[in-house]
Amino acid sequence: MWKDLDISVTRREPDQQKSKPGLENLGFGVHFTDHMFLMKWDRENGWHDAEICPYQNFSMDPAAMVYHYGQAIFEGLKAYKGDDGQIFMFRPEDNLERMNSSALRMCMPRLPVEKVLKALKALVYLDRDWIPTADGATLYIRPTMIGIEPVLGVRPSEQYCFYVIMSPVGAYYAEGFNPTKIWVTDKYVRSVKGGVGHAKTAGNYAASLMAAQEADKAGYTQVLWLDAHEHKYIEEVGTSNIFFKIDDDLITPPLGGSILGGITRDSVIQLAKSWGVNVKEQQLSITEVIAAIEDGSLKEAFGSGTAAVISPIGELCYKNKQYVVADGKTGELSQRLFEELQAIQNGSQDDPFNWIVRVG
Ligand SMILES: *Cc1c(COP(=O)(O)O)cnc(C)c1O
C-alpha cells in the first residue's frame, strides 16, 4: 500500500523480529515495535530520504542543535484494533496539523500532512501484529521532529529529522476507573501567554518535572497548573486538559496561548454538545472551583488526553487543604464520555463526527 509513495521500505528479517511483550506487562511506552518511519529535511531538498526501516538507534553529532537548545516537538496518537480485526487511528490529521502549529512556533519546517498520514498508515499496517487486542489496550504512536544541524549558534537549525516510533500500551484503567488525586501548585507554572505552552515541545515537559515530583512526594498523582500571572485561573492538569461539571454546565478553560489544545478536549466538547450538554469554554479560578466543591454545585471533574482518554478527579489539594470531588467517585458524565469515546475509537460504535481513519 506504500507503492504510490516515495518511501523506501526495509523490513526486519523474520528471524530478527523482536518477541512481543505479554499483555499483562505492557506498561506505557516501554516496548517498541519492529519498524519506524524516518525522513530528513534541509533547505535545499525539503523533506527527503523517507523510509520505513527496522527500529534502530540514531547516530548523531553531539553538537546537534536539539541537544543544546531543545528544538524538539512531538505528537501522541493511537491505533486500535476493532473486534472484526479492522485497524483504526483516531483523528490522525488533527495530530499532524497540531504538529505543524508546534513547528511554526518553534521555527521548524512544516510537514506534508497527506504524505505523512500515508506513511503512518503504512507503518501501522506493517506492524499491525503489535496492536494489542485486549480491551482498552492500544498501539501508541509517537511522531517526533528534532533539529539536527551540528552548530552551537543559537538560531533555528537548518537540518531536521522527523521520525515515528510506536509502542503497544496496556489499558490505562486495568482495574477500572480510579479517580486521581490532584495537587494544585501555586508555586510552579507550566507556561505563560506569549511562551510555548500551546506547542507540544520537549522543554515544556522538562519544566514540569519538579512540580510533579513535589506532588508525588505529597502523595498526589498529577499537578493542576494555574495561570502564570496571578496563580489564580485553572489551566491544565498534568499533560491533560481539564473539565468541571458545575450544576448543568461543563466548563473548560479557553485556549488562550498557554494551554495545549487537546484533540481529546475537542472531542469531549463536540460529543457533550451533541448530547445537549451546555459546554462553556471560559476562565475559571481555583477559588470558584473550591467554592463550588463546598456548596455542592461541583458535580464532576476530569482530565482529558490521548493516554487515558478521560481521567476522573477524586480529590484536590490546594494550599495544604484537601477537598473531595464528587465523593471521590467517577461521575456519570465522565463515565459516559469515556465509554462513548472508547467505543468510537475502537470502531464498535458509529462515528458521527468522522473521527476514525481506517488503516489497511
Ligand atoms: C498532549 C497534551 C494534552 C492532551 O492532548 P490530546 O490531543 O488530547 O492527547 C493536554 N495538555 C498537554 C500539556 C499535552 O501535552
Image (cartoon, rainbow, N blue to C red):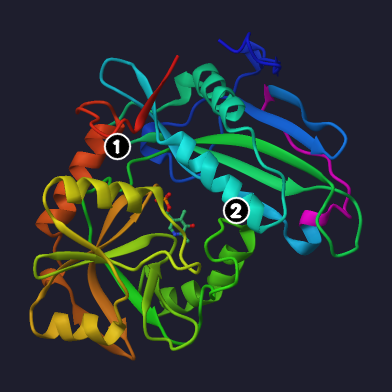
Q: Measured along the vertical axis of the image, is residue 38 above or below residue 249?
A: above
Indicate the amino acid at tag 1: Gly
User: Which of label 1 and label 2 is nearer to you?
Assistant: 2
Main SS of the magenta part reads loop
Q: Position of residue 196 (x, y in %)?
A: 59, 66
| Closer-to-camera residue (28/242) | 242
Query: Which residue corresponds to the image point at 33% horizontal and 16% vertical from the top-left?
Result: 85
| Mark 1 touches mark 2? (CB < 8 Å) | no
Span shown in magenta:
53-66
Residue 336 spot, x, y in % from top left = 14, 47
In terms of image quadrants, where is residue 350?
Answer: top left
In the rendered view, tell whether residue 148 sits above or below residue 55. below
Give the residue number, with chain letter if any, for mark 2: 102
Residue at 77% in and 34% down: 40
Q: Is residue 63 magenta?
A: yes
Circle on res. 136: 1
The residue lying toward the viewer, choosing from 245 and 309, is 245
Q: Quadrant of the N terminus?
A: top right
**Kind of residue at badge 2:** Ser
- Ligand 1's quadrant: bottom left
Lower sequence index among marks 1 and 2: 2
Measured from the top left, where is residue 65 in percent x and y?
82, 56
In the displayed structure, 180 sits above or below 16; it is below
Q: Is residue 204 magenta?
A: no
